[in-house]
Image (cartoon, rainbow, N blue to C red):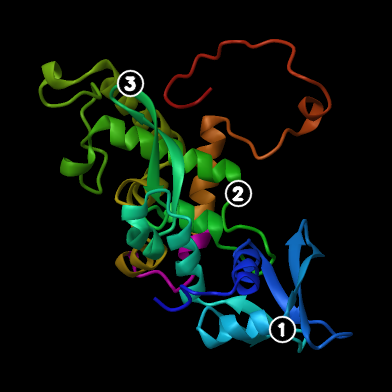
Amino acid sequence: MAGDSLPREARRLLTALGQPETWAIVDPTDPASVLVHRRRSGISVGAGRFAHAAADTLVRQDLGCWEQAASGRKTLQLTKAGEARLRRESAPESDMAFFHQHHETGLATVETETGTTRVRVDSDESPLDWLRRRKGRDGEPMIDEASYQAGERLRTDIMLAGLLPGVTARWDGMPKSGGPASPGEATDRMVAARQRLRNAFDAIGGDFSDLLLDLCGFLKGLEQIERERQWPPRSGKIVVRLALARLAEHYGIGASARGPAASRGIRAWQAVVIEGGRV
């Protein structure tokens, strides 16, 4: 494969450019070198110096390319082939290197019928992961951590409830008992998950419920959601952010502590009784 015999300097530069929000520029005081910069908390910081020959090697093997930045300065960034090579080399299992080359994976803790377990998941599969990785014009992720955690919690309940194979877009016909057609087939975990779903959907409303079912349950992307609902392009992310924010509010998940709670520690835990999805 292209780049399998990369020189050590080029390999180190490739790894450095693989970090989030990282790029390289030609050293204005030494054209024979390139400087790597990385953005942290909105500030550009230096992340190393490499020989310009290493950058030329990456460009020659289609692992990197020079792009014109908004400031007019050329920056070196990884190509899709460069990102794929890094994923292949970092694959935890050698026999799965090709799979990791073409998919972004990560470790996650998921709920199953037997309890929690640690698994490796395909990050490209979940629209929630895609929304959390993508940044808007303001440089912030499309959804914050609270919205992401709320969506993942809903996704887990949808899976535990076992509703996806036979569910439709309408939830008004959902059994009042929250159980399956045959009560003997349901487990306590499944019944509890269905009750949590009913509470969540009652709290956020029917329109948002259908949207989040498609997003978190059927794993439909924004483009597919916009196309099926005949929404204007790029309008789906706005509605999705509103829906996830309301879901996070229902779950009591906040991005940060506010008010008096932000200035003092937790002194006591108290039980809260939830009825109908509302405190």
Q: Earlier in the sequence, mark 3 or mark 2?
A: 2
User: Is 117 above or below relative to 149?
Assistant: above
Residue at 79% x, 31% y is 259
**Residue 186 relative to residue 62: left or right:** left
- In the rendered image, which residue does mark 1 sit on? 52
202 or 221, which lies in front?
221
| Amino acid type indicated by mark 1 | His
From the image, tell me which residue sits under label 3.
Answer: 192
- How far across and down, in percent of the image, does residue 143 sit? 57, 53
Local packing at callout 3 (Cα closer than 10 Å; few below 14, some 14-19, many 20+) is: some
Query: Mark 3 to mark 2: distance in Å?
Result: 27 Å
Q: Is residue 228 visible?
A: yes
Q: Nearer the viewer, residue 112 or 269?
A: 112
Secondary structure of residue under mark 3: helix
Classify mark 2: helix, strand or loop: loop
Magenta stretch, residue numbers? 229-238
Q: Which residue is mark 2?
A: 144
- Image height check: is 115 above or below 204? above
The crowd level at tag 1 (other Cα within 10 Å; few <14, some 14-19, many 20+) is some
Numbered disc in front, either 1 or 3: 1
Residue 101, picture quadrant? bottom left
Horizontal arrangement in the rendering, residue 139 relative to residue 3 (left or right): right
The reply to whether callout 1 and callout 3 are in contact (CB within 8 Å) is: no
Decide: is 71 above or below 132.
below
Amino acid type, label 3: Ala
Residue 69, visible in the rendered structure: no
Amino acid marked by disc 2: Asp
Q: CA distance from mark 1 to mark 3?
A: 60 Å
